Image (spheres, grey):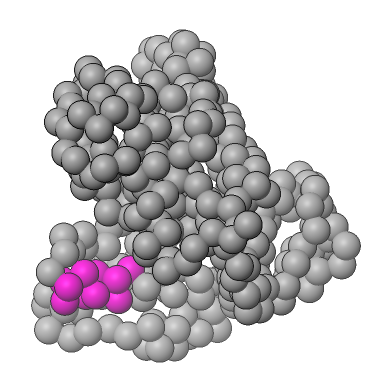
Amino acid sequence: MLRTFRYPAELTKAQSALFDEWLVRTQQLYNGALQHRRDAYRRQGVSISYNRQTAELTELRAEDADWKAVPVEVARSPLRRVDRAYKAFFRRVKRGEKPGFPRFRSRDRYTSFDVGRAKVSGNRVHVPKAGWLKFKLYRPLQGKILNVTLRKESGRWHVCFSCDLGAAPPKVVVRQMVGIDVGLTTFATLSDGGEVAAPRLFRKGEDVLARRQQTLATKRRGSKSRRRARTLVAKAHRHVRNQRLDFVRKLACELFGRYDLVAFEDLNIRGMVHGNLAKSIHDAAWGLFLRCLTDKAESAGRWAIPVDPRGTTQNCSACGTRVPKGLADRAHTCNCGLVLGRDLNAARNIEALGRSAAAVRPKS
């Protein structure tokens, strides 16, 4: 079970300046390595491998004192990233998906580099040729460290530890289960009648974001004031993103503290974010919530079961009869006598499908 632990870095001015320099160098090397591969194939029909580019990097480090001052793991990280981008491209081509050829990265879109398996002591991590740097250890670091990444986001550096936590705990026997129907008016409706109010975090913060974007639009391109304004816009986005992540993580923990199995609709969210409801769907962050549910279930030994969403709203949860409804119809009324909210009816159908998919039965 792999997990990433991310902590805010507490750098000195010298360390911050050094990492900024390394970030620029790795971004340039990434673009150079990508251009090298493209030119070699277009002009000579030759595919350049990661090993060949690594060997050329070794020659460059031997001749260039500036590159020799950069740790070898840091220097190799953009080459590995280019190699992964190419492998992912060919994998998508083979599967018949939209390929998405690897793109060049500007400084604003290249924000991290790897430092390998660094030494960790308490709230400090050792980075080669930079010394020990401190980070805010606000939660315990667990598992075996596989890689350390330094990431800069909105003007602030973070230390990310990729860790192996070992095998996932065995699944528990299901005694309590629930189905969840996500929505926009109410964030989530539970099959036992409970509801989770929609936080609408982006709507609450869009006034601040709009003011900062208006300020950004007045700045001259390439100026320092424009870069500062861009940072403020990025911080506004980061604040909303962190609020969403905090909300869905706490909700996932609460659900698996009460239930052993949570069933949810396997929604095609990407296909839904079009039209007038696109902003509201993005604001609801269903995809983030469902990913957090799945990750939490794995680490807690619980069950997170995706089910086919077709018919969950239209079918009656009591008799199975199809009862057509439009988006404006908020109540479910069936000839069998069942009358309840459409979201609650859908949640009960989702729970039944989840029970069947997991091949389990509740125990008293």
Q: Position of residue 48 (x, y in %)?
A: 28, 83
158 or 173: which is nearer to us? 173
Give the farthest residue toward the right: 122
Res 165 quadrant in image? bottom right
Q: Position of residue 67 (x, y in %)?
A: 56, 71
Report if residue 105 is visible in the image: no
From what the image shows, is residue 172 above or below residue 155? below
Q: Position of residue 50 (x, y in %)?
A: 38, 83
292 or 105: which is nearer to us? 292
From what the image shows, is residue 60 above or below residue 5? below
Left/right of residue 106 with respect to residue 207 in the rendered view: left
Report if residue 329 is visible in the image: yes
Res 285 quadrant in image? top left
Left/right of residue 2 with respect to residue 95 in the rendered view: right
Main secondary structure found in the magenta portion: helix
From what the image shows, is residue 360 above or below residue 228? below
43 or 257: which is nearer to us? 257
Q: Quadrant of the N terminus?
A: bottom right
- Residue shown at 50% from the left, 71% from the top: 77
Is 58 included in the stretch rendered in magenta?
A: no
From what the image shows, is residue 306 above or below residue 96? above
Chain part drawn in magenta: 85-95
- Residue shown at 71% from the left, 76% from the top: 144
Q: Position of residue 132 (x, y in %)?
A: 82, 62
283 or 138: which is nearer to us? 283
Is 92 included in the stretch rendered in magenta?
A: yes
- Residue shown at 23% from the left, 44% from the top: 320
- Residue shown at 46% from the left, 80% from the top: 57
